[in-house]
Image: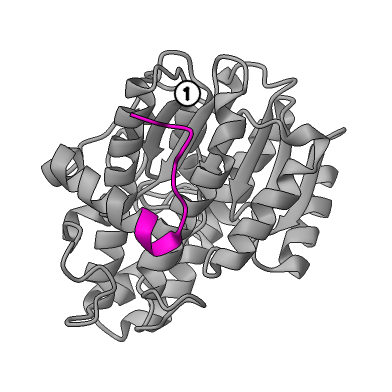
Amino acid sequence: MAGWKASRMPDQSGRAAIVTGGNSGIGYAAARELARRGAAVVLACRSAARGRAAEVALRSEVSGADVEFMALDLADLASVREFAAAYGRRRNGSLDLLVNNAGVMALPYGRTADGFETQFGVNHLGHFALTGLLLPRLLAAPPGARIVNLSSSFHALGDVAHDDLNSQRDYRRWIAYGRSKSANLLFTHELARRLAAAGSEVVAAAAHPGYAATNLHVGATPQAGTTLGSRFTAAATALGNAIGNTVIAQSAASGALPTLYAATAPGVRPDEFIGPRLGLRGAPVRSRRAKWTLDDKSGERLWGASEKLTGVSYTSLSR
């Protein structure tokens, strides 16, 4: 794993991948490298204009890239269902890799189309529903299929609040973000357990980018007020965008390495959490995680609530 770079990725020819939020930042960088190694990549994005622009840009960067934009709004479960159905009609719906990358960060309180708090709804519930709807295709794939959920080192800000999943009693934007990222890890943990219990070889793993200069941070900065933390975020992001890799922020291409490692490197184990070696930046390594993201009972509780809230049951994983 030491010094791992995208150039060390195995050949991805013949593999089909979906990258949510693949129109910019880490998602775009990951999609580009997957396409460069031969994967057929779907950019699952909310904005049609940005998604189509990313499709054109990626084809210009990677000669012969097999890439396609498909509309997906994770803040609307109807859109998630429509995407899954549309994907099933595409190329017989084969799927080898699902990268749940898209997300929002530190927004003012809001609700999704289905009434969920926006960060929990988009970052966790939307991806939970998407994964459940696409899981039969991953289970039918040849050996090597993977699901990679993007979390964050900010998951350490808070455990999942099982008694207030939608933050109705107390909303603090950064705590809500941290809880949604804890939910990503807890979902990965429980999904890995259930895949193993079903005898499946599909690997569910998680990754985090450290601190990368992407639109996620740019979008979050104005929402966070004028605190020292938000000024630091703005300055580090500006440096990263201007210089590429810095001592503070790293480029989106570098930030995508943990995702690509989790998605393609040989020997990645179920429920592994991959992040930068130095925490904020560096080559991908196994990352530390809060103990609550490894709690079986908590995982089962979140799973049950997520099935109830989304209406998506993982019937293909009977236990």
Q: Residue 111 appears in which quarter of the rendering? A: bottom left
Query: Does residue 132 sit above or below 111 in this rendering?
Result: above
Mark 1 nearby-residue class (10 Å; few <14, some 14–19, many ≥20): many
Query: Per the image, is 235 magenta?
Result: no
Whether 69 is drawn above or below 91: the answer is below
Q: How is the image coloured?
A: one colour
In the image, what residue occupies the spot 47% across and 28% down? 261
- In this view, 20 is above or below 315: below
Judging depth in this view, the residue of 290 and 165 nearest the camera is: 165
Pinpoint residue 9: horizontal percent, then vertical percent.
Answer: 58, 21
Q: Residue at x 53, y 24 (%)?
A: 264
Q: Quadrant of the N terminus?
A: top left
The quadrant of the rendering that contains the C terminus is top left
Residue 311: in magenta span: yes
Quarter occupied by residue 104? bottom left
Q: Circle 1 is placed at which residue position?
A: 202
What span is in magenta?
307-319
Relative image position of residue 153 (x, y in whole percent): 27, 50
- Quadrant of the rendered image containing residue 198: top left
